[in-house]
Image (cartoon, grey):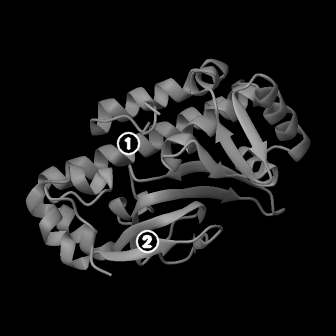
Amino acid sequence: MSIPASPNGALGNRLLDAMPELARERLRPALEFVALDSNQTIHEPGETAEHVFFPLQGLISMVAMMEDGTSVEIGMIGKEGMFPVSAILGDDRPSQRAMVQLPGNGLRMPSRLLQQEALTDAALQLLLLRYVQLTLSTAAQTAACNRLHVLEERCARWLLSAHDRAESNIFPMTHDFLSMMLGVRRPGVTIAVQSFRDSGMISYNHGTMSILDRNGLEAASCECYRIIQDESKRLVGSPLAMVAAL
């Protein structure tokens, strides 16, 4: 399938489109269009990551796995970024599982080609390193959030982040999956979701989440959502949020 592009040459992924134009055009022939299917695992811990992925639609979750089988989400990537960020630093064996949470599509290219281009283009290297810093800052803020904030606030933050990347007020989501992403037991998630339903912020039916009152969710969230948005704007020039106007 041909690579989608707008009349101005934009590809639809914010990180790709923020690259210097000449660098992006040199990379374009190596980009391959791929489908991102629901629940698809695109990377297992310790495997060689031969490709980097740039989502155009959908959501990829980075999940830390424990020896006892438990897991927690440590990051999410939509059309604002790429996976794995470790490729920027020359590491081709990231230790996280990457799985498609919301289906969509994206572009991929060999990791080594992106690394080679970054070595010869200082402006591209700076952009990619700032994206690495954003990823580290987001992970640090999420770790603090998971330790210090109550489940309802964390759940609201997570739903807002997923809503941004879904680019729709309606997206698939189960209680089981949400509990895995937040690293908590399912009954706790059920209570939080029911509270949001009772307050008219969301509706939930047969694995489908509908955001009805985004402003209410933002008020219910902790400050971490806003902090991460501000850091994104500072480092890469635009916030992660994509649907605030819906």
Considering depth in this image, is 87 or 209 the residue closer to the camera? 209
Query: How many residues crowd around disc 2 within 10 Å: few (fewer than 14), some, or many (20 or more)?
Result: many
Task: Name the image quarter holding residue 202.
Answer: top right
Task: Name the image quarter holding residue 142.
Answer: top right
Q: Residue furthest bottom?
A: 1
Estimate the spatial distance between the alpha carbons at disc 2 and disc 1, rounded to whole Å. 18 Å
Residue 184 in the image: x percent, y percent?
A: 81, 43
Q: Residue furthest right?
A: 187
Residue 172 in the image: x percent, y percent?
A: 67, 54
**Residue 223 in view of the camera:** yes
Q: In this image, 8 relative to 82: left or right?
A: left
Q: Residue at x 50, y 38 (%)?
A: 138
Q: Residue at x 52, y 49 (%)?
A: 166
**Residue 43 in view of the camera:** no
Please state, as top left, top right, bottom left or bottom right, where the N terminus lies in the image.
bottom left
Q: Relative to 170, say whether 237 is above or below.
A: above
- Mark 2, residue position: 92
Q: How many marks?
A: 2
- Give, as a three-letter code, the residue at label 1: Gln
Considering depth in this image, is 85 or 109 the residue closer to the camera? 109
Q: In this image, 101 relative to 81: left or right?
A: right
Quick one: label 2 or label 1, which is nearer the N terminus? 2
As drawn, the label of residue 133 is 1
Residue 210 in the image: x percent, y percent?
A: 66, 41
As drawn, the label of residue 187 is none
- Give, as a three-letter code, the residue at label 2: Asp
SS state under label 2: loop
SS state under label 1: helix
Q: Relative to 27, say whether 240 is above or below.
A: above
Q: In this image, 54 relative to 47: left or right?
A: left
Considering depth in this image, is 180 or 244 the residue closer to the camera? 244
